[in-house]
Image: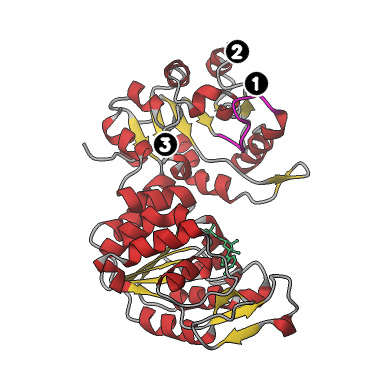
Amino acid sequence: MALKYIDEAKIAGQKVIARFDFNVPIKNGKITDTTRVDSALPTIKYILDQGASKLIMMSHLGRPDGQINPKYSLNLVATYLAEKLGQDVVLTETAIDSSVKGIINLPKHKIILLENVRFHSEEEDNGADFAKTLASYGDIYVNDAFGTSHRKHASVYGITQFFKNNSYGGFLLKQEVVALMKITDNPTRPFMAIVGGAKIADKIKTLERLLVNVDALFIGGAMAYPFLKAQGKKVGKSLCSDGDYDLAKKILAQNSSSKIVLPIDHIIANSPEAAAGAVEVCKSVDIPDDMIGFDIGPETIKLYQQKLSAAKTVFWNGPMGMFENENFAKGTFEVARALANLNAFTLVGGGDSVSAVNKSGVASKISHISTGGGASLEFIEQGQLPGIQALKFGI
Ligand code: AMP
């Protein structure tokens, strides 16, 4: 069965229960970045425009660990949504208390937001009764929470068993799946990937999967040092755990490792707090014993730009250096610019690379920026996600 999207659903007169990712950052009682809610609006508006009798929305916010905690209430989201939609949005006291059904059944309430589903441990435990209660609120189920779809949680996974032929992906989920499939299913070649960041252990499966598929894999950031060390190069005091070194060695032992491109020079300092004047270019691939690599060097930038210029598909995850510090941001920003200038399908996924692309000012020139860091990496590893698979086949 193919994955059905919401534009195939008969919505008029139906109660729609939909899972979104409204996990927004909140500071001093204000939402500091509304992107996640804004990205859900096309699906929300479509459901309302198509004449749903009720829209019941679900989301998590933060990590309340199964406890009711006002700090993680969705109340600010409810207020923001009401403002954006120009209609009342009723927030329930909890997602499953006895008053919820009454609220849904009151004719005057059309748009209902269930309070944080993670106030109940059954959400993350994929509790069957919890999923059944959530399912009882609607006739049709919609998942537009791509960023949570790698989790087998009740509101994304367990709930689908109660909507065998009535589960649909929302527009945001569709956008993500269509974009990611351009990477996982016959990418236009040459297909190149850039992986950076700090920890190989977190990305080992993605690296291995990518190596099978790509024509070239560029490594940058702290991720590069275990590889360089495994090749017998000197990495000074750069970040390089024994575990990551072992993983790098394992990857380099594979035939496909010939596709890996590593830095040939570096930006170094003796501490991340070093003043700009104490930051040096290390022209050699070997880093002096008492120094730390914090960014890729100018020759590496040139090399990566030149090789990337042939690419027709590019996936990027993880910064090329400690880009939060402006002394070490150039490699990341230059790679972002290189991607922006390509005549290719470019996809950036993963929290830090997304903020790096935003900071570099070229976000609008990237073909697709994934909203789900962990989910996009897992999609690339597996070619699928549990929450999306469940939409297709049920569980
Ligand atoms: P990740 O979450 O694995 O994508 O890692 C992102 C983090 O890696 C960012 O906070 C960067 O500052 C950090 N990072 C990247 N390169 C380096 C480096 N050479 N040394 C220390 N931290 C780095």
Residue 25: give x, y in percent of width and height. Answer: 65, 46
Q: Is residue 216 visible?
A: yes
Tell me if residue 187 can be seen: no
CA gap between label 2 and label 3 equals: 24 Å
Q: Specify whether residue 175 is painted magenta.
A: no
Q: Is mark 1 within 8 Å of ligand 1?
A: no
Image quadrant where residue 26 sits: top right
- Residue type, numbered disc 3: Asn
Residue 119 position within the rendered picture, expressed as x and y whole percent measured from the top left: 60, 26
Labelled disc at residue 143: 3
Amino acid at pointer 1: Glu
Report the magenta stretch's main SS. Answer: loop
Mark 2 or 1, nearer chain start: 1
Disc 2 + disc 1, Cβ < 8 Å: yes
> For the magenta stretch, what is the residue range?
60-69
Sort mark 1 into few (<14), some (14-19) or many (20+) by Cα contacts within 10 Å: some
Residue wearing tag 1? 93
- Left or right, 159 with reference to 293: left
The image shows residue 330, relative to residue 160, as above or below, that is below
Q: Is mark 1 in CB contact (under 8 Å) with mark 3?
A: no
SS at mark 1? loop
Quarter of the image holding residue 136?
A: top left
> Mark 2 = which residue?
99
- Count residues near mark 3 (Cα–Cα under 10 Å), then give few for <14, some for 14-19, many for 20+: many
Q: Secondary structure under badge 2?
A: helix
- The x and y percentages for residue 121 are 55, 24
Pinpoint residue 50: horizontal percent, then vertical percent.
42, 35
For residue 372, above or below residue 364? above
On residue 235, the disc is none
Q: CA distance from mark 1 to mark 3?
A: 22 Å
